[in-house]
C-alpha cells in the first residue's frame, strides 16, 4: 500500500492540511537512510501516522520539524529492532512447525461444511449416524432401538454416509446444483449404486452438467469397481487410439482371444471416431461383465446433435463425411450385441457387447 | 516428420523403391500426415514402387484401411506401385468382418515378398493382378 492511500483514507482535508505536504520531505529523509524500498515506504507511512496522531498537539508552525524528528526516530527504532532481532534470532528457532496462516480458516470452513451437510440429513439419519460413528454404538444395538435388523441399519448408515458426502461437497462448492437431477445423480454415484445410476442415466448427466462433472470426480475415485471399468474421454483424434487401447487391455484381462481383442478394439475405434467427427465430445466406457457369461461391454455416449434416422445410419454405405460409411454398421458386425439410442439435439448412446467364446483360453 | 520423440513411421529409400514402416498405432491426424509425407516423397525420390509395412498395427479400422487404399491410389497416379505388407491375421479377419473393400490394393505377406513383388512387376502391377481387380468391379 502506498502512503497516498493512507492519506486519502483520512477524514476531511482540513484535519491535517499540512500533513500531505510533508510526504515528499518525510520520504526523502527515510529513503536517504533506508535502502530497501518496501521497508522505507513502510517507515514513511508509520511516520505520517504518528505525525497525524500528534497533529493537534503540535504548534502549527512546528509540524515540519516534528515530522523530521519523528522520521529519524522511526528509522532509528527500526535499526534497533533489527539489531535486537539479529542478536536473539537463535532463541526463536521454532521447534513446532508454524501453521499456515489459512489453516485455521480452512479448518473452520471444513467444520462448517460438515455441520451444514449433517443438517441436511433427516433427524433420524443424523442421530443414527452420529451414534455409530462418534459414540461408537454398534449396528446391532442401534437396530434394537430402531426396531430394525443390524443389516438394515448398516444399509441405512451406508446411505447416510453417501448422502453426507454429496452434501459436504455441495457445501464446499457453496452453490446450489443447477438442475433437479443433480442431487439424485450425485447420490447414486456416491452410493456406488449401478442400477440407480443406470435408471437416472447418470453418465449422460455427467456429460451434460459441468457442475456435476466436477463434483463427481472425488465420488467416483472411491468407486469399488475401478478394476473392471475404464472410462476414456473422447474429444480429439488421439483419444480414439486411447479408447481402443483401453478396451483391448481390459478385455485381454479376462482372456479374450487375439482375434476377438482386435474385433473389439476396431469396433471401439469406429464408434469413438463417430464421437470425434459428429459430436465433438463424449466418452467411451469399457466394462467387464460376468453375467450371464464373461464379456466386455462398451458404451459410447456423446452430447452431439444426435442421429435423425438411426435405421439409415445403420445401413451400409451411409456416410455423412468422406468415410466408407462403415462406422456404425461396421461396428455392429464386429460385436455380438449392438444398440443405438439417439435423440436429436441431445446426443447418441451406442451400447455394444462382445461375449467371450466358450472354450477359448 | 516434424514429430519430436521416437519416430512413428520411417520412410527409407532403397534404389527406386520406398520402404515405409509404421512403428506404432497412429491416430487419424498422424495417418493423414503419413499419407502426405509418403506421396510427397514418391516425387522427391522418383520412386517406382512403395512398400508399406503395417506389421506393427494391431488395428486397421475403416479410416486406416481407407487411408492405405488412398495412398496406393495416389501413388499409382504419381507413377509408383504400392504393396502393403505385414497385415496381421487378426487384423485381416477384422477387416473382412468390418466389410472393408480393399480389393484394388496389392498386398504381400512380408517385406521380402513385397519387394519381390515390386521387383518382379518392374514397379508395375502385373497384368494378372490388374485383370483380377478389374473383374471384381
Image (spheres, helix red, strand yellow):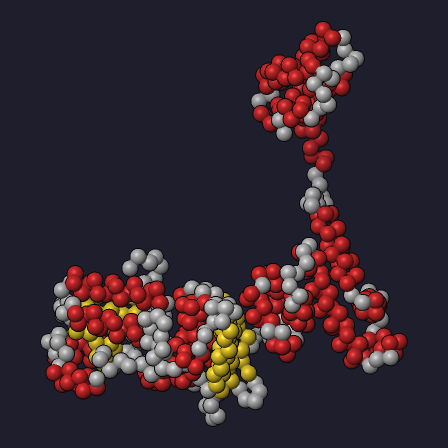
Outermost residue toward the top in this view: A61
Q: Is residue B67 left or right of residue A52?
A: left
Q: How many marks?
A: 0
Residue situated in front as seen by the camera: B128 or A38: B128
- Percent of width and height locating residue A179: 64, 63
- Percent of width and height locating residue B59: 37, 76
Q: Quadrant of residue A319?
A: bottom left
Q: In the image, what residue occupies the spot 75% across and 69% down?
A: A160
Inspect this view and state whether residue A43 appears: no
Q: In the image, what residue occupies the spot 60% across and 27% down?
A: A38
- Percent of width and height locating residue A96: 72, 45
Inspect this view and state whether residue A345 appears: yes
Q: In the image, what residue occupies the spot 35% across and 59% down?
A: B5
Please state, as top left, top right, bottom left or bottom right, where the N terminus of chain A lies in the image. Answer: top right
- Percent of width and height locating residue A317: 34, 79
Q: In the image, what residue occupies the spot 35% across and 67% down?
A: B28
Q: Is residue B36 left or right of residue A347?
A: left
Outermost residue toward the right in this view: A145
Q: Quadrant of residue A66?
A: top right
Q: Quadrant of residue A125?
A: bottom right
Amino acid at each position: 500500500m502506498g502512503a497516498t492511500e493512507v492519506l486519502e483514507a483520512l477524514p476531511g482535508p482540513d484535519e491535517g492540511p499540512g500533513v500531505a505536504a510533508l510526504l515528499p520531505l518525510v520520504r526523502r529523509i527515510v529513503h536517504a537512510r533506508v535502502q530497501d524500498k518496501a521497508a522505507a515506504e513502510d517507515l514513511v507511512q508509520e511516520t505520517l501516522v504518528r505525525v497525524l496522531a500528534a497533529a493537534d498537539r503540535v504548534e502549527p508552525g512546528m509540524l515540519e520539524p516534528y515530522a523530521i524528528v519523528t522520521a529519524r526516530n522511526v528509522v532509528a527504532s527500526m535499526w534497533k529492532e533489527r539489531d535486537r532481532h539479529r542478536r536473539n534470532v537463535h532463541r526463536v528457532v521454532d521447534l513446532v512447525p508454524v501453521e499456515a496462516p489459512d489453516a485455521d480458516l480452512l479448518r473452520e470452513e471444513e467444520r462448517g461444511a460438515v455441520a451444514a451437510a449433517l443438517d441436511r440429513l433427516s433427524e433420524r439419519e443424523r442421530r443414527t449416524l452420529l451414534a455409530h460413528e462418534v459414540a461408537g454404538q454398534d449396528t446391532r444395538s442401534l437396530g434394537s432401538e430402531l426396531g430394525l435388523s443390524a443389516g438394515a441399519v448398516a444399509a441405512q448408515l451406508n446411505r447416510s454416509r453417501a448422502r453426507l458426502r454429496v452434501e459436504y461437497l455441495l457445501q464446499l462448492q457453496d452453490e446450489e446444483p443447477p438442475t433437479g437431477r443433480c442431487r439424485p445423480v450425485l447420490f447414486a454415484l456416491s452410493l456406488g449404486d449401478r442400477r440407480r445410476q443406470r435408471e437416472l442415466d447418470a453418465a449422460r448427466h455427467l456429460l451434460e452438467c459441468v457442475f456435476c462433472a466436477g463434483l463427481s470426480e472425488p465420488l467416483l475415485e472411491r468407486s469399488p469397481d475401478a478394476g473392471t471399468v475404464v472410462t476414456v474421454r473422447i474429444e480429439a483424434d488421439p483419444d480414439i487410439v486411447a479408447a481402443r487401447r483401453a478396451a483391448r487391455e481390459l478385455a485381454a484381462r479376462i482372456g479374450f482371444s487375439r482375434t476377438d481383442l482386435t474385433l473389439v478394439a476396431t469396433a471401439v475405434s469406429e464408434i469413438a471416431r463417430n464421437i470425434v467427427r459428429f459430436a465433438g465430445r463424449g466418452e467411451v466406457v469399457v466394462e467387464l461383465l460376468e453375467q450371464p457369461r464373461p464379456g466386455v461391454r462398451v458404451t459410447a455416449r456423446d452430447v452431439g446433435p444426435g442421429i435423425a434416422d438411426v435405421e439409415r445410419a445403420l445401413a451400409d454405405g451411409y456416410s455423412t463425411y468422406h468415410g466408407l460409411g462403415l462406422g456404425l454398421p461396421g461396428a455392429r458386425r464386429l460385436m455380438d450385441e449392438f444398440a443405438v439410442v439417439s435423440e436429436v439435439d441431445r446426443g447418441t448412446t451406442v451400447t455394444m457387447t462382445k461375449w467371450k467364446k466358450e472354450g477359448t483360453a | 516428420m516434424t514429430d519430436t520423440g521416437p519416430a512413428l513411421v520411417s520412410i527409407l529409400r532403397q534404389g527406386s523403391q520406398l520402404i515405409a514402416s509404421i512403428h506404432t498405432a497412429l491416430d487419424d491426424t498422424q495417418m493423414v500426415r503419413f499419407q502426405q509425407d509418403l506421396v510427397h516423397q514418391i516425387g522427391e525420390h522418383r520412386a517406382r514402387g512403395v512398400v508399406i509395412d503395417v506389421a506393427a498395427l494391431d488395428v486397421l479400422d475403416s479410416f486406416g484401411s481407407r487411408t492405405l487404399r488412398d495412398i496406393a491410389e495416389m501413388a499409382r497416379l504419381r507413377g509408383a506401385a504400392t504393396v502393403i505388407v505385414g497385415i496381421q491375421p487378426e487384423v485381416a479377419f477384422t477387416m473382412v468382418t468390418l466389410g472393408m473393400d480393399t480389393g484394388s490394393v496389392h498386398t504381400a505377406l512380408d517385406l521380402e515378398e513385397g519387394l519381390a513383388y515390386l521387383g518382379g512387376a518392374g514397379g508395375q502391377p502385373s497384368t494378372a493382378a490388374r485383370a483380377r481387380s478389374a473383374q471384381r468391379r
